[in-house]
Image (cartoon, rainbow, N blue to C red):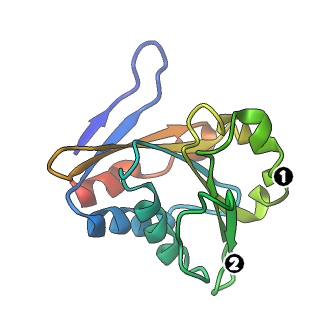
């Protein structure tokens, strides 16, 4: 685990987590679910096969939502209601979207306040959804391990114990 502090230029703090297996990716998602609340936006990025959906499956397990979390590539967005009175999980795949204008067409502003919203392939497309968000950048290495970069953006995430999550996975 590496915890990189903010630079003099004001760049955000980056917390690095190593996930050696798919199970570790799901566990990271489950652990992070305990820190999320309605209104949170998570933007996931990484190459094909990096583990974005696997991470989101763990998040869905942690949030205790209904339905199997699968990639919404062809339907763009899927809503998983909570089974326990918590926030729903809105799972979006922006891979086929052409840019921020097309993500606006999904009307996520209607669901964001009451949900935890995850946007796969969201880098460069979904940042305008919220000034407060958690960016999750995943690198997959040749040995199938992943380095997950957790990047808090905005006041919402400033006091969240992401180093504690990172320490549990490293």
Q: Residue at x 68, y 67 (%)?
A: 78
Above/below status of 131 relative to 145: above
Quarter of the image for residue 149 reads: top left
Q: Crowdedness of circle 2 by 10 Å Cα count: few (<14), some, many (20+)?
A: some
Above/below status of 125 relative to 9: below
Residue 133 location in percent, x, y?
60, 44
Q: Residue furthest left?
A: 143
Residue 3 location in percent, x, y?
29, 38
Q: Residue 165 or 46: which is nearer the viewer?
A: 46
Q: Residue 9 or 21: which is nearer the viewer?
A: 21
- Numbered badge on residue 107: 1
Q: Dot 2 corresponds to which residue?
A: 81
Q: Secondary structure at mark 2?
A: loop
In the displayed structure, does residue 76 sit left or right of residue 134? right
Residue 104 location in percent, x, y?
81, 42
* Residues at marks 1 and 2, CA–CA distance in whole angstroms: 17 Å
Closer to viewer: mark 1 or mark 2: 1
In the displayed structure, does residue 142 sit left or right of residue 166? left
Circles 1 and 2, Cβ within 8 Å, touching? The answer is: no
Q: Secondary structure at mark 1?
A: loop
Q: Is residue 34 visible?
A: no
Q: Residue at x 21, y 44 (%)?
A: 141
Mark 1 or 2, nearer chain start:
2
- Tell me the quarter of the image containing the N terminus: top left
- Numbered badge on residue 72: none
Q: Residue furthest top?
A: 9
Q: Residue at x 59, y 57 (%)?
A: 73
In the displayed structure, does residue 77 sit left or right of residue 119? right
């Amino acid at each position: 685990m590496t915890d990189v502090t903010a630079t003099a230029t004001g760049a955000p703090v980056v917390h690095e987590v190593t996930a050696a297996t798919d199970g570790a990716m799901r566990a990271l998602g489950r652990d992070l679910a305990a820190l999320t609340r309605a209104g949170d936006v998570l933007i996931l990025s990484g190459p094909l096969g990096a583990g974005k959906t696997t991470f989101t499956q763990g998040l869905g397990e942690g949030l205790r939502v209904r339905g199997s979390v699968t990639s919404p590539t062809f339907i763009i967005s899927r809503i998983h209601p909570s089974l326990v009175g918590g926030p729903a999980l809105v799972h979006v795949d922006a891979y086929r979207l052409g840019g921020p204008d097309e993500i606006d067409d999904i009307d996520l502003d209607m669901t964001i306040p009451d949900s935890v919203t995850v946007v796969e392939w969201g880098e460069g497309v979904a940042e305008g959804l919220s000034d407060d968000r958690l960016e999750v950048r995943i690198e997959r290495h040749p040995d199938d391990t992943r380095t997950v970069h957790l990047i808090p953006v905005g006041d919402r995430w400033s006091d969240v114990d992401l180093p504690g999550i990172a320490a549990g996975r490293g």
